Amino acid sequence: MSLLCVGNSEDKTALKAVLKKLLVLPVTMILVSFLTFAAFEAVSGDPARTMLGTEATEEQVQSLRQELGLDRPFAQRYFRWLGGFFSGDLGISYSYRQPVRDLIGSKLLITLLLSLISFTLITVVSLPLGVISYRWKTTVFNQLFMAFPPFFTGILISWVFGIIFRLFTPGAFPDIYTDTGRALVHLFFGSICLAVPRIAMTVRMLRSTVVSEMNKAYVRTAISRGNDRQGVLKRHVLKNSLVSAVSFLGQTLAELVGAGIVVEQVLGIPGLGRFLVTSILHRDYPVIQAIVVILALWVGLAGVLADLINQAIDPRLRIRQGVVSA
Amino acid sequence: MEKKVFVVLLLALLLLASCAKKSSQVPSDEVRIGVSQDFDSLDPHHMTAAGTKEIMFNVYEGLVKPDSSGNIVPAVASQVSRSEDGKTYTFTIRDNVKFHNGRAVTAQDVVYSINRRTDGKDSAAKLAALNVIQGVSAQGNSVVIELKEASNEFLAAIMNAYIIPGDHGDLETNPVGTGPYRFVSRSVQDSLVLERFEDYWGTKAGIKKVTFRILENAEALVLGLQSGALDLVAHLSSDQTVQLDSKAFTIEEGSMNLVQALYLNNKAKPFDNVLVRKALCYATDKRKIIELAFDGYGIPLGTSMFPSFGKYYVDELTDYYSYDPQKAKDLLAQAGYPDGIDITITVPGNYTPHVNAATAMTELFRQAGIRATIRLMDWGTWLEEVYSNRNFQCTVTGVTSDNMTARKLLERFGSKTGNNFTNYSNEDYDRILAQALAEPDDAKQTALYRELEKNLTENAANVYIQDMADLVAVRNGLKGLTFYPLYVLDVSALRWEQ
């Protein structure tokens, strides 16, 4: 009976900790949006001039600045944007003169899919490989894969699977809504480019944790008591090693969205990363703001997710966090 | 263990290879074109990017339009007449011209379209080149335009007043024009689809469907051609073209119709001294730059004009300054810089040809005691700092004319012109420019423009390099690619032939 009580209060503190993290998310997003706004205030480059190009007269630029509200003071502009953001209005893109929300939808979906597919690949491949590889020495292969830049793998994979085997068509990304199957295949090859170096990193990290854990006293004791090595690995070592692996993977999940930019460019995937780069070049503030905030949300969520999983694996973390938050 | 994994992987690859499909068939009613920059606004009066105008040329038309040899030919108007004093133009609207939405074009639509570009209610749509217009009115089936003064360039300027329906909806998402192709769909940063307009008044387009794919990465464009996803890509670099299989593609060479030069800020030290500017000209070996950075593709230029503008082009000016690093050193010493000079070349970093030209120049300059550093800027910053604020020493960029007039290329060097980003200021130049702009006789005006070009060269206003080559990869079987003296891609002339 008393045990059950303890369990309950533990769960509550854990829940509190997670809730707290979730509450911090909007604050992070606002902070990030403010910093982005301020950063573009500091760098030179006038959206109105970029929109109108080299042919425009000074008058035209000025009246467009007025029309876009760019002549207003910084704080006023920022709070206007923030107000719009909270009411679901992301503004109108400067370059395309269309609502940002309409432009971003499919790109967000594509980037999410790309990240999730490569994350699945990383997890499915690197976890078992990391655990069984504790008996092998680190190899040149591992080092080599880790150093594969997505730019290079992107070209290589397009060549081998796109041009020789024709499993997908580089340069013609199928419509994600009407031709979902082929679009997913295209994304799958993109996600391989993203996954390769990260699989190598995760395997290496997991292997070194397993190796150091296997050398610990409790393992020696367990084995000397007659437990077989495999059993100890499965029952004890794996669980203890997973915590750091999950944190690492959480970080990877957060990174993937940003890392996709190069792959999106080389494989011609119309995702969020490419859109962000172009929008920065064109000083398309509303688009930049929206994408940056979405990325901040993503990074935050990945962290919360990793925490949740870790707490499920290791009860000690639940108590520790409860104490800290109390 | 790892060996086994490797063998398995290899076997899997071989298996894949055996079931690999044969090269896909090229569809005969579609052409797929790769472009390296996304289109901006599709509203014909708002589009700014050269790449958007290049493609939307197929969707929109003005009263008149250019043909491939540089003539202005009737389009939405079937006839143009000019009054004796040159101040009144009467355009007769062609009978059978329809908008893509099926409605016939009326004189009111034309008046509306021209007003939208001139009345300033929509500031972004205002076109400075049309400031000469006094008034526009519809008279039955024709439109009468009164000018403030006679102008030889009016017809060229009115080309860009694209005709749109007066009752149009949102032109960004649903562009409606009168051209040989109509808009079907657009996905930002991904694709644009056009379809042949069956009710087009003129020669109907050869290919039914056109898909433009936006791939800003140079490798992605090449991969797209190789994988069969693209049939045509223009503005390639020679590096890109050598990667293509010559059995599958033909490389056509045209010119970009722009003046690539090291543009000097004539007000910034040390370029306010004509001797220094001349030294820079003598230190520049145009042909060497073209050879080093462009594999020999490109036409060397000596002034702000290129050969495709025919009568305006003065060929003798190209070699006015023959390459002579010693003379450059002497001139620098004469100007008070016996130890040479240090300069900073600002370049918009996303335009590789300009970066490459600047790099080659830096190497050549060294032999004449000119130590140059390259400063890269992104396009937005460049526009603000260099083009608008004129806060720079020198920059490599390309200047072009979007309406086939010499005026567009030369007016900008007048000391009072708003977009004179080089701060070039020369009394003779201003005087001849004023004469040229006011001259009603075409032959006399041409002579004056040629004078202006000579003035720019003699005073070493800028260090002219070249008119860049336009290398276009075309899949074999695709015919009809035509180069214009303007930055346009005429898709309607393309067709598949076996």
Image: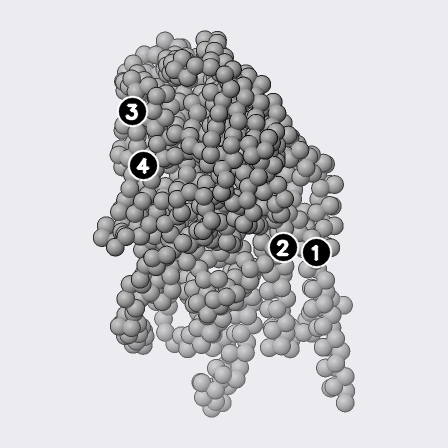
Q: Mark 2 lies on which chain?
A: A
The residue tagged with tag 1: helix, strand or loop? Answer: loop
Q: In this view, does B165 lie above or below A239?
A: above
Residue A130: x and y in percent read 44, 73
**Which of disc 1 and disc 2 is earlier in sequence?**
1
Residue projecting furthest to the front: B140
Quadrant where the N terminus of chain B sits is bottom left
Residue type indicated by callout 2: Arg
Residue type indicated by callout 1: Gly
Q: Mark 4 lies on which chain?
A: B
Q: Residue at x 42, y 74 (%)?
A: A129
Per the image, the residue denoted by label 2 is A101
Q: How is the image coloured?
A: one colour
The residue tagged with tag 4: helix, strand or loop? Answer: strand
- The mark found on residue A88 in the picture is 1
Per the image, the residue denoted by label 4 is B254
Circle 2 packing at 10 Å, graded few (<14), some (14-19), many (20+), is some
Residue projecting furthest to the left: B247
Residue type indicated by callout 3: Asp
Residue A189: x and y in percent read 41, 65
Residue B273 at least partly seen: yes
Q: Which residue is drawn at 46% across and 70% down?
A: A181
Q: Do the residues labelled 2 and 1 touch (CB within 8 Å)?
A: yes
